[in-house]
Amino acid sequence: MSEETANVGEGANSTGINDTSKKVTAKISEYSGKVDKCIEGALGVIGNRPWDSWLGTANGYISKFLPAAIALAGVLACLTGLITMIKNDAPFSMVVKQLFVLVPVLFAMHLAPKALALTRSFVEKGEPLAIRPELLYIMKVVYGIGGLLLGAYLLLNFDASLVGLAIAAIIFAVLMIICLERPAIVGVKSEYPTNCVEEVIALMLFPIRVVIALLTLLIGMAAVGGIVYGVVQWFDDGLAAALTFGATALAPFLVPLVVYFFYLVIAFALDFYRAIVSIPRKLDELKK
């Protein structure tokens, strides 16, 4: 009887432990679910907006006003250069040469929107990259929440020298949340890659795709900022203003082409790597 009583007691203890374990597991799952909802809600405040249509609208308006901004910057660069040369008693031939600044500006004004469209075609017309949904979520939380927390931490230091870095961290976090919440914007699909090689290629091309997708917006902001900065420099140093205006006029055409060729080189190298890695598998298939 004592052995039976002991077995019954052990069974009751085991049942009690199992019940307690189930309750603890259920509570952990409940709180974990609440944390997930809080994080998703915080990310959704930024990410759950029609960013893709807004970005398309912004790109359209920027492409329309960009030639005018380039022309304005070119004229200001030419005028500023002329004034600087005259003040410095430069030879007449040097003064006349400043007028030729307008020639490349005319080309940039005409070709800059087409160069931006050429670069954007990698994302808009190219084959989308596949990245695992779990990895996209991890990147979204790490870059998004982490960037926002870093920006808040830097601001709380009340150090004027860190304000710029804090703003950059917050902007980076917001952009990453947008791109990872709506990956189609940067030409990425939330799917499982066919193999590890494809996954490595997708991860390496992802940051470049982000830059390409936002390039028109960044160029437009830089053009406006360049003109404003050049006007400010006008009163301090005419030569610096002329160089700033000149860069503002030519960069919207040159930068997209540089990004285009850089992406071509990276994509070619990765495709070449993909072809080399796939040789053993193809040889095995031929043997079979």
Image (cartoon, rainbow, N blue to C red):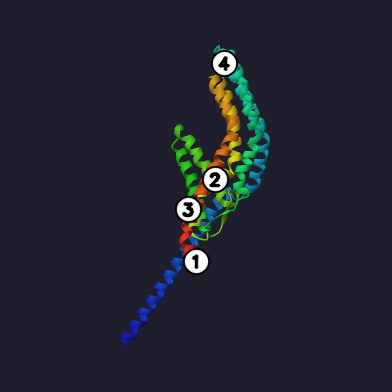
Q: Secondary structure at mark 2?
A: helix
51 sits to left or right of 19 = right
Q: Which residue is mark 3?
A: 273
Please report whichever mark, 4 or 3, sits nearer to the chain's N-terminal start: 4
Q: Which residue is mark 1?
A: 286
Q: Secondary structure at mark 4?
A: helix
Residue ranking furthest to the left: 2
Residue ranking furthest to the bottom: 1
137 is higher (above) or lower (below) than 88? below
Dots 4, 2 in contact, CB < 8 A? no
Q: Residue at x 47, y 68 (%)?
A: 287
- Label 3 and label 2: CA atoms lie apart by 14 Å
Q: Judge by depth and name the residue closer to the eye, 214 or 40.
A: 214
Q: Which residue is mark 2?
A: 264
Residue 104 is drawn in which quadrant?
Answer: top right
Please report whichever mark, 4 or 2, sits nearer to the chain's N-terminal start: 4
Residue 54 rendering spot, x and y as whole percentages: 65, 44
Q: Which kind of residue does numbered mark 1 sit on?
A: Leu
Please report whichever mark, 4 or 1, sits nearer to the chain's N-terminal start: 4
Q: Secondary structure at mark 1?
A: helix
Q: Which kind of residue does numbered mark 4 sit on?
A: Met
- Label 1 and label 3: CA atoms lie apart by 21 Å
- The answer to whether residue 47 is visible is yes
